[in-house]
Image (cartoon, rainbow, N blue to C red):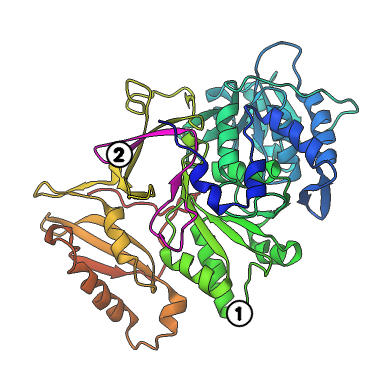
Amino acid sequence: MLTSREPFAKYCSAEDFAKIKEYDTVSQMWLHCIEEYAEDTAIEDSGVKYSFSKLDEDVACFRTLLKDDSDKKLRVGIYCKNSYDFVKAYLAVVTLGYCAVILPPQLDAPTVFGCSMKFSLDKLVYAPDMEENLGVLRSQRPDFITVSAADTSDTKTDIVIPEGSDPCVIMFTGGTTGKSKGALLSNTAVMQGTVNGCYGYETVFHQRYLLVLPLSHVFGLIRNLMTSLYTGSDLYICRNNKDMFKDVAVFRPTILVLVPALAEMSLMLSKKFGRNMLGESLKYIIAGAAAVSPYLIKEYETQLGVKLLQGYGLTESANLVSGNPESLRKPDSVGLLYPNQEIRIVDGELWLKGKNMMDGYVGEDETGVYSEDGWFKTGDLVRIDEEGYLYITGRIKEIIILSNGENISPAELEVHFNKPDFIQDSQVFEDVDENGSHFLSLEVVPRAAIIETMGLSDPADFIKTELEKINTTLQPYERVQRIVVRTSDFERTPSMKIKRYKKC
């Protein structure tokens, strides 16, 4: 049975909820945008404002540079940092009915060449300041067509309306090396992810978004860029994260899409300086890509009057699977399932089908990823409560099997150790002593801003004592045997998730 959008209706104004329409393709959505929002500002970048009509004009001219005389559905790489040129190039590719292959800007020259081969690129759009990384590609494929994102044409090429099932974008599933998989998302999947970003909060249209996350990440592309365009909102591009607070002061965003680590830093600075560093206009923070601390949800709401809404998604699901409109009441949940999905929970693992799901990995063996009847196996362990709210309890590949045969989910234990406000992050892992005996260890990163206010003579000893009290409430086989208080953060992935220690 398909999930419905109706559970989200009560969290949105009736007027805005009625305006949320579904489109099969990005081209159809874009035609609606330029008709509905023509003179509204779509993008602000480097001090220049671009209206929807101006962006449409630039996209139409850039389509001319990319168009092929054949009827082939081309794959066009986009190798640019966050910028107006990225937005222009991306829209030009997908509104030609082509497939955009998003290459993370930090890729080096050999990897750019490797991706051109792995993903069978026909052309590549590049930012001029990254041209030096095209050397290997051009030497190995001298006839390969590259187009500068800064170029334009005197003539326009009309928009193409593909089928909803046609490929729209290929995105890396994580990491920045050639070993990362590319998830192929159809137009329908991208549009379902885009529309899902409209559910769960009151005022949806004509907002002010600040773009901080990389557009090479599905959270940045779908939730930050696409939903902003879809809703006729103004998107200000932050070129350098170090300038985020300066840009906030200038732009005054109403919605921010952030990873929890950035939300944590912003809250800490707001408390330190006694004012909301994210601006008085801010209404919502949409947080994802990593687990969100209940502390952040509580503090943003009670101290700054900002709703922090967390959710859950995968690159393979066009980012958005669920969103939590009741984050203050249910801070441990990743929310209600978005519409047009089917779910199964098999041995605790979440399986998905739906309009938002990828068509597959490009050039990869998909054995074990799909069931025989087409269900995508997420690898995430979950539960659903009586109100339909989803909870992530761990990852199958992270399960620790103890010597007594018990299965331990580190993430499930970390929920307990993360409850004190003075704990920012934790990691439970399998450790081994000098005799070769295996046991559970815990490392924690304290929330320095809170610890400093407590006037403790020995903060580490206090933290260990308090965590040991929590430890004793767990089942005997779940208890950690060692607690370490870190003085630095954990190593993190590009999406700011904690890098798990390898199993012993």
Classify 187 as above or below 202. Answer: above
**Residue appearing at x 51%, y 29% in the figure:** 355
User: Closest to the observer: 497 or 416?
Assistant: 416
Which structural element holds mark 1?
Answer: helix
**What secondary structure is found at the residue carrying circle 2?**
strand
The residue that mark 2 highlights is 349
**Magenta segment:** 324-351
Across and down, in percent, residue 398 comes to 29, 46
Displayed quadrant of residue 59 = top right
**Residue drawn at point x = 59 percent, y = 20 percent:** 166
Q: Position of residue 311 (x, y in %)?
A: 47, 50
Where residue 87 appears, x then y in whole percent?
72, 40
User: Is 349 included in the stretch rendered in magenta?
Assistant: yes
User: What amino acid is at disc 1?
Assistant: Phe
Q: Nearer the viewer, mark 2 or mark 1?
A: 2
* Amino acid at the residue labelled 2: Glu
Apparent side of residue 351 relative to residue 195 in the rendered image (left or right)? left
In the rendered image, is residue 77 in sight? yes
Left or right of 286, for residue 374: left
